[in-house]
Image (cartoon, helix red, strand yellow):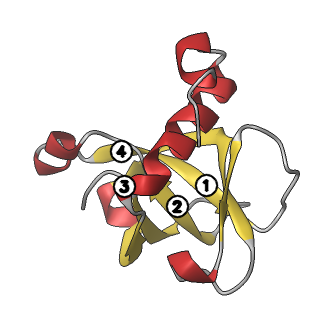
């Protein structure tokens, strides 16, 4: 498990089985049992707290990592690794988290 990986997770209802984007720092996976993750959903609102995902990320249809829905996920809930975001996409994730938490220093990240 590593930061910016996409995993299938078995979450409590009503979320159920869905992909999530891991956000915890890499060294946390060696000793923590719960990790911060963004839920991935097919409900696309085209707002700054979303990171678009699709076939390049091995998603079956267009979806987003919704950084308004961050949660702690148990190690045991993570079922199968799907993909790792390339380093070129990490700024998008940081910017979306910045918007979700109103952290202006991340909201202003240039994505070009």
Q: Marks 3 and 1: CB-CB under 8 Å? A: no
Q: Tell me the mark number nearer the camera, choosing from 4 and 3.
A: 3
Label 2 SS: strand
Report whether 80 appears left or right of 63.
Answer: left
Q: Distance between the residues labelled 3 and 2?
A: 17 Å
Residue at 25% in and 47% down: 33
**First along the sequence among labels 3 and 1:** 1
Q: Name the residue under label 3.
A: 87
Label 4 SS: strand
Mark 1 crowd level (few <14, some 14–19, many ≥20, 10 Å Cα): many
Q: In this view, does 79 lie above or below 33?
A: below
Q: How far apart are marks 2 and 1 (CA)?
A: 5 Å
Q: Marks 3 and 2: CB-CB under 8 Å? A: no
**What percent of the width, then of the height, locates residue 3?**
32, 51
Q: Mark 2 points at which residue?
A: 20
Q: Which residue lies furthest to the front in this view?
A: 112
Disc on res. 49: none
Task: Find residue 76 and report its image quarter.
Answer: bottom left
Report whether 23 appears left or right of 25.
Answer: right
Mark 2 crowd level (few <14, some 14–19, many ≥20, 10 Å Cα): many
Disc on res. 35: 4
Q: Tell me the mark number nearer the camera, choosing from 3 and 2.
A: 3
Q: Marks 2 and 1: CB-CB under 8 Å? A: yes
């Amino acid at each position: 498990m590593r930061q910016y990986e996409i995993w299938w997770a078995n979450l409590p209802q009503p979320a159920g089985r869905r992909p999530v984007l891991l956000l915890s720092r890499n060294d946390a996976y060696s000793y923590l049992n719960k990790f911060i993750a963004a839920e991935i959903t097919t409900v696309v609102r085209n707002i700054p707290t979303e990171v678009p995902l699709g076939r390049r990320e091995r998603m079956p249809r267009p979806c987003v990592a919704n950084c308004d829905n961050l949660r702690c996920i148990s190690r045991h809930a993570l079922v199968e690794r799907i993909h790792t975001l390339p380093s070129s996409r990490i700024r998008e994730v940081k910017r979306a988290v910045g918007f979700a938490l109103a952290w202006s220093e991340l909201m202003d990240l240039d994505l070009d």
